[in-house]
Amino acid sequence: MLESHRGRIFAGLVAVCALAAVAYLLVASHAPQIAPAATKPAHVATRVATLEGTTADARRFLAANGVTHGTIVFRDLDRHDTSNWGRIATAPLATAGNRRLLGTRHCERVYVESGHGLCLAKGGGFGTLYSTEVLDAHFNVLHRIALGGIPSRARISRDGRYGATTTFVSGHSYLTPGKFSTQTLLIDMANGKAIANLERFKVTIDGTLVDKPDVNFWGVTFSPTDSNRFYATLATGGKTHLIEGNIAQRTARALHTNVECPSLSPDGTRIAYKKLVALAPGTPRIWHLHVLDLRTMKDTALAEPGAIDDQAEWLGNKVVVYGSGEEIKAVRADGTGQPVELVAAADSPAVLN
Amino acid sequence: MYQVQNSQALVAVHRRLFARGRTGPLVARTVMLLGLTSLFTDISSEMVSTVLPLYLVYTVGLSPIAYGFIDGLYQGAGALVRVASGFLGDRFGRHKEVAAVGYGLSAFCKLGFLAAGGVVGALSAIIVLDRTGKGIRTAPRDAMISLSTPKEQLGTAFGVHRALDTTGAMIGPLLAFGMLAVAPGRFDAIFFVSFLIALVGLGILTLFVQNKRVDEAVGEEETRPPVSLRSAAGLMKSKTFSIVVALGFVLGLATMSDGFVYVGLQHRIGFETRFLPLLYVGTSLIYMVLAVPVGKLADRYGRMIVFGVGYSLLILLYAAMLLPNVGPTMLVVCILLFGTYYAATDGVLMALASPLLPEETRGSGLALVTTGTTVARLFGSLAFGALWTIAGLNAAVVVFIVALAFALGLTAVLGRRVARVADA
């Protein structure tokens, strides 16, 4: 083959490849596949059309459990109108015939507390895919912090002083130990600055200082009475621990094992969390919702039968709510009753009392 | 008259000084073409590996634990096939074809990602195949670079190749992020474009690169026995070559993986971890910029010396990990150290080993060196992880500094013997 022939073949190859790439990108950019593909679309499609707030079932359940007011804030997962996918939405908890209200921010995870909000959103500075947006009471962005990694959890202390975010940090392409590690940041809500990374805290398990390469933290929950005090999950050596931390002292100590994504009740006595358990011998371990009483260390399995991967939220002291697939469910915190669907086509619940 | 003569002499001196710059290009055409092949291939593969964690966890819905398992597969698959492909290239004198199989396999795996959808088993298989492709292409490619380059320019040649390779590795992630910005969530578009870019790389290799026929260099009467497994194994009989393999192995044992360097420094940087990607990007940038000049230095002043200096810089980097707090200035120093270390060791090791190997077993020989180093690094990283777990980060770093100093001392002693042959 002559050199000039080869040149022509190569030029043809490059031209075809460039054309194909541009064509594919043009089509792709006009029909963005915003919704993740692997979650049960058939089930959601039938229920999302009305776009109501809480379901009638849920309102009966809430009335039976003494919840008569309050608002729920969540992420709208409307598959019929993808421009609404991931928008912050609010709905009154106990009002019949309500419609959900949509905000302007699109988030991957959202949390609100007493006039402050956190929205873990797509887009950020150079080289980052996501950022944390610190919001005011009207969901306007006050501050923005670049996030290294995929958003997972967000929480704000009752007094609105501190926020906390957890992301999955995906590293570079070389051999990395714990490449898929988590990063948990504490944020000063007043100025939108990260004030501490939990990895820099001095953490003890049974009095021994932890210094291991495989240490990961996630799922912070703040004490309702003292925002300096928090609980979170520490993972090391294949085990998860519930830790109690002190922000001012940058210390934490382990209290209990097999506790992930803890969530403190408003009265500060109990922790709702997900526990890795096998329901029957020989079956794989999956996450189940449990409640741990911090005074007695009594552990109670909740009535939700399915696997749950979320940080639960308390609705008063008797009910916990949580994301399950593409709906928000509610269940009694004492292990009795049955879970009900609270909001269809939604996740990332936060309750405003 | 006198003045004229004088100036003529000056012109002559000038001519001699600049002769190389005027007469020939920096490196052989094959090296340039292989560099471009690697550039396109690295754009393609880094595009995918940048978004793969996102894709697996967010779209496929994989748990991080399952992701960790797949990631392990990803890293482990390449090493084994490397020696085999180096040998096959030697055996049939067809390095180009063997390399093309490797490049082609990885290219078509990008289409495989599209076809696999969310099936985890299929995805794992494609990740392993993709890595196997990388394992196949490395040794024959390095053999072609060294076979098409005069002995005294090997450092420069490998420098040029690694610079182009790293350029591709830097463009890839940017392109992937840019595409996600234009078409959010369209991982299929990334896989498809990645495939097309890999095709361009494969096109450069298959259309323009030619095997150097080893036979041509040999007189016609002299008939050589074909390269057998025995002759490849006989490589280790060469004392200088076995020293290089051994030194690469020992230094590799005392080297922690990049991941540990980044994670270790992360523990020292504090909460500003959003700057952490800069460490990676900065290191690549320094490597890219310095690969050619450092390669030239190696050709000029001795590859063994430059190689040793490179590992000395790594000791300094490890020492920085002992500091209680790494500030912005120190971080820049770390990036400089790490990038320069790569420029002074990665391609230079190939340039160092090449002259010690007969042309007909070049592929097998270079594969032995890289496999030895890679396997040793894997052991080194496992040891580092264990040490960190048992004794803490500081103790682990101190142990590795001592080990690296020992290995470097060994290099200084044994390396002279290698340098006499390699730099002769």
Image (spheres, coloured by chain):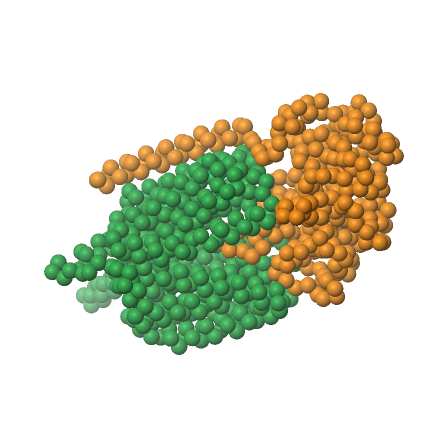
Chain colours: A orange, B green
Looking at the rendered image, the quarter that the C terminus of chain A falls into is top right
x, y percent for residue B285: 48, 54
Is B160 or B401 nearer to us in this picture? B401
Residue positioned 78% across, 35% down in the render: A338
Q: Is residue B68 left or right of residue A308?
A: left
Q: Position of residue B421 (x, y in %)?
A: 29, 71
Q: Nearer the viewer, residue A19 or B296?
A: A19
Q: Position of residue A4 (x, y in %)?
A: 24, 38
Spot the residue most to the left.
B221
Viewed as shown, does residue B347 lie left or right of A306?
Answer: left
Tag count: 0
Where is residue A327 drawn, in percent x and y?
A: 70, 33
Can you see residue B295? no
Q: Is residue B168 left or right of residue B322?
A: left
Residue A94 vertical placement versus A259 (above, below)? above
Which quarter of the figure is the N terminus of chain A placed in? top left
* Residue at the image position 34 percent from the left and 69 percent from the top: B242
Q: Is residue A337 left or right of residue B336?
A: right
Determine whether B182 is above or below B139 in the image: above
The answer to whether residue A168 is visible is yes
The residue lying at 58 percent from left, 35 percent from top is A38
